Amino acid sequence: MEVSRVSINNIQLAYTDTGVGRPIVLIHGYPFNRALWTEQLPALSNDHRIIAPDLRGFGDSDASQDTSTMNQLATDVAALMDHLEIPSATIGGLSMGGYVALAFYKQFHSRVRALVLADTRAQADTEEGKQTRAQQAEKALSEGMAGIADAMLPKLLTPETVSKRPEIVKFVRDMMLQAKPEGAAAALRGMAEREDQTELLAKIMVPTLILVGAEDAITPVADSEKMHHAIDSSRMVILDHAGHVSNLERTQQFNDELLHFLSHS
C-alpha cells in the first residue's frame, strides 16, 4: 500500500489515499494498521476515494507518549481530512476504529455523510476490562507485541480460520507485531478511558451500516444489536463464519455489503 505522510497534531501521520469518487475514511482497529483494509481498497477504489490512516502509534505513524484518547484519534482524522481538503466523508471503523468513528461523530457530526461500524460497540469498558487493558499496556511496554499477538489471535479469528487459513493468521499476526509498544500502550489507556457513547446513538441521524461477525468473541452480535436498535437510520448485517476481523474472514460479503450501502447513502 502506497504511503503518504503529513505533520499534524505534533506527529507524523501516515495514510493511504487512493481511488476516485466520494470519500470514505476507513479507521483500523487495535493493534492493527491501515493494511487491515488491503482487501477493501480494490473493491471500493473504482467509485470511491479511500483514505486509510495509520492511527498514531501504529503502522508508519509516530507514537506519542501521552494517552491516545479516542477523541484525540478522532481529532487526528479530522486534521487529516482538513489537509486533504475533504469537508465531509463516510466514516468507517472496525473495533477500536469504531470507537474512533463514534468519537468523530460526536465532535464533528456535520462532517459525517454516513457511518460504518464494524465489530465494535458503543458502551465503555467495565472495571474488569479497564484493568485488563492496563495489564496489557504494561505487558506491551515490558515484553513487546509478540505475547500480546499470540494471546489475541484465538479471540480475533474463528477456530476454523485459525486451523485452515494460515495466510490470514500470518497477516493478522504480522500487523500486530508491527505496532509500536508505546503506541499500543497509549491506545490501550485511551480505550480504557473512553466515554460511553450509548446515549449518542439515538442522536445519529446519518445512514449507518453495522457489520459484525457471527462468531465475534470480543464485541459479540449483541453489542451490534444494541447499536442497531438505538440508531434509527441503521442497517445491521451479521457475517457468518467470521470473528472479530470480519472484513478479512468474509471479505466478499463485507465488500458487497459496504458497496451496496455506499451506493445508497
Image: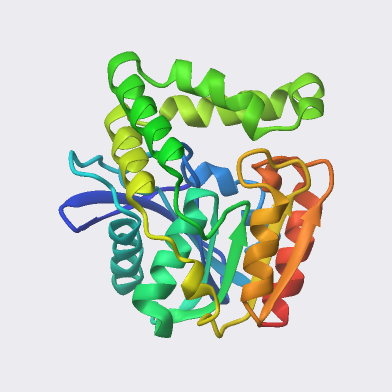
Residue 212 appears left or right of 63: right
Query: Farthest left residue?
Result: 10
Query: Which picture quadrant has residue 235?
Result: bottom right
Q: Which residue is drawn at 60% across and 46% down?
A: 38
Residue 235 visible? The answer is yes
118 shown above or below 108:
above
Q: Residue at x 35, y 56 (%)?
A: 70
Residue 63 appears left or right of 15: left
x then y, percent, for residue 229: 68, 72
Q: How many labels does the image show?
A: 0
Residue 72 appears left or right of 261: left
64 shown above or below 212:
above
In front here: 53 or 108? 108
Residue 85 visible? The answer is no
Q: Residue at x 57, y 71 (%)?
A: 115
x then y, percent, for residue 26: 52, 59
x then y, percent, for residue 219: 62, 47
x then y, percent, for residue 113: 53, 81
In front here: 134 or 243? 134
186 shown above or below 43:
above
Q: Which residue is drawn at 68% across and 47% down?
A: 220
Give the image's coloring scheme.
rainbow
Query: Which picture quadrant has residue 134?
Result: top left
163 shown above or below 243:
above
